[in-house]
Image (tube, rainbow, N blue to C red):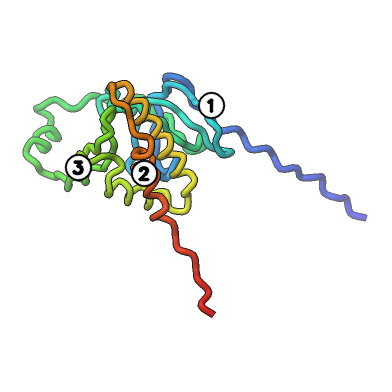
Amino acid sequence: MPDEPPDRKSKPRPEPRKPHTGDVLHLTRAASVQFLCPIFVRVIRVLDWPTYDGWLWIDGYELAGNGDAVARRSLFVMPAGLIWPDPPAPAAPSPSHPRAREARSGEGRMTRRPRPHQPMRPAWLCRNCAAPWPCAPAQLHLATEFYGHSIALAFYLAANMQDAVDDLYSLGVRPDPRALHARFLGWLSLTRRPRRVDLR
């Protein structure tokens, strides 16, 4: 009889690298569908909140292009999709550099991308239209980006609502729980797909 092939045991998948305090992460759609516009975040801590297998919550500061913190956020991400960026690129060219002259003259300038409707803390107003966040454009954007992931969207909005409560108390304002729930989570029922009705 021919020799039987040895048992082929599937190799266990390596555990994805997990973030630690102080890490700078580049968050893209690989980390979560919410990051249509990628952002950089400096990790404050990894939260021990209950979540799905393969996901985690991190508390961190969103960073501007110059590295300054612009907002503190609680983010729902997949460790397998996190990116640890390379060291920063060299400084911009001097004013006499050809590319610097081109930038000043406007040559090769691309059309400016629309500004996203993101929350401005601690007031929780939209950075773009100044409406209470999530404003209508933000709701549309979130419903599109989280399409098919309604539970993840609910987790994300609930975390933002809790952050808004904390921020309002820090400002000396006593928030209205019902109003905040309607504002952050009440609109989710409108995003559900209607069930098919059997007319027979």
> Which of disc 2 and disc 1 is earlier in sequence?
1
The secondary element bearing badge 2 is classed as helix
* Res 31 seen here: no
Q: Is residue 143 above or below residue 28?
A: below
- Residue 129 found in image quarter: top left
At a point 38% along the width and 51% down the height, the residue shown is 143
Residue 47 image position (x, y, % from top left): 50, 26
At a point 44% along the width and 42% down the height, the residue shown is 32
The secondary element bearing badge 1 is classed as loop
Residue type marked 1: Asp
Badge 2 crowding class, 10 Å Cα cut-off, few under 14, some 14 to 19, many 20 or more, is: few
Residue type marked 2: Ala
The secondary element bearing badge 3 is classed as loop
Across the whole image, how many numbered discs are drawn on residues? Answer: 3
Residue 132 image position (x, y, % from top left): 26, 39
Foreground disc of the pair 2, 3 = 2
At a point 10% along the width and 27% down the height, the residue shown is 95
Foreground disc of the pair 1, 2 = 2
> Which of disc 3 and disc 2 is earlier in sequence?
3
Residue type marked 3: Cys
At a point 32% along the width and 27% down the height, the residue shown is 174
Name the residue carrying label 1.
Answer: 48
Q: Is residue 2 above or below residue 89?
A: below
Name the residue carrying label 3.
Answer: 129
Name the residue carrying label 2.
Answer: 182
